[in-house]
């Protein structure tokens, strides 16, 4: 691991911890050249491919999902740690189910299921983009389902 400050390749691990329920390890490192301390994360690299609605495939990207969730939860009382836990839960479900290919539609439904329990407003915000509401009637139908 290269130091982000000086680019030195000689770093040492100071501390390692597993991250909650995910397949990740958080490592605290120190550069031997400049003494800078930084954190790295290691995740299981078992690729999951997402099949988009146009048929193209791309690797599962938790950061892309996090950005969408951050938009949906903007100005809501939801911590980043809650969003990461939600994504960890989705990723664990995908890996436990022997999924190597999953549709973006399936991932969207997994997110909605969890957001419904976490925050109803965030659920509606995410659903309006994910389901591509065409008019106010579709929006109202979704609101009625939540009640």
Image (cartoon, rainbow, N blue to C red):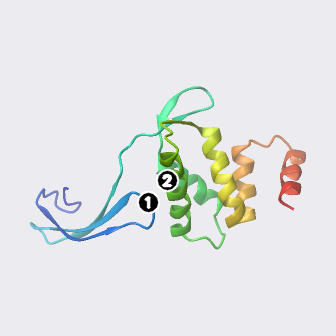
> Circles 1 and 2: CB distance less than 8 Å?
yes
Residue at (21, 63) in percent of width and height: 5
Q: Position of residue 110 (x, y in %)?
A: 63, 50
Q: Position of residue 33 (x, y in %)?
A: 9, 66
Residue at (33, 62) in percent of width and height: 25
Q: Position of residue 93 (x, y in %)?
A: 54, 51
Instruction: State the count of labels.
Output: 2
- Crowding near the residue tagged with mark 2, few <14, some 14–19, many ≥20 C-alpha atoms within 10 Å: some
Alpha carbon distance from label 1 to label 2: 7 Å
SS class of the residue under badge 1?
A: loop
Point out the image quarter for the C terminus: bottom right
Mark 2 sits on what residue? 92
Q: Position of residue 10 (x, y in %)?
A: 10, 60
Judge whether 66 appears above or below 31 on screen. Answer: above
View extreme (front): residue: 97
Residue at (53, 56) in percent of width and height: 87
């Amino acid at each position: 691991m290269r130091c982000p400050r000086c680019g030195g390749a000689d770093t040492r691990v100071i501390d390692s911890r597993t991250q909650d329920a995910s397949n990740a390890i958080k490592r605290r490192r120190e550069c031997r050249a400049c003494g800078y301390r930084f954190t790295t994360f290691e995740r299981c690299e078992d690729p999951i491919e997402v099949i988009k609605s146009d048929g193209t495939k791309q690797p599962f990207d938790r950061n892309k999902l996090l950005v969408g969730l951050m938009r949906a939860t903007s100005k809501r009382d939801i911590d980043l740690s809650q969003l990461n836990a939600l994504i960890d839960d989705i990723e664990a479900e995908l890996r436990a189910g022997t999924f190597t290919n999953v549709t973006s539609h399936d991932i969207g439904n997994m997110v909605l299921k969890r957001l419904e329990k976490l925050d109803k407003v965030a659920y509606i915000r995410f659903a309006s983009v994910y389901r591509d509401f065409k008019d106010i009637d579709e929006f109202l139908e979704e609101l009625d389902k939540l009640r």
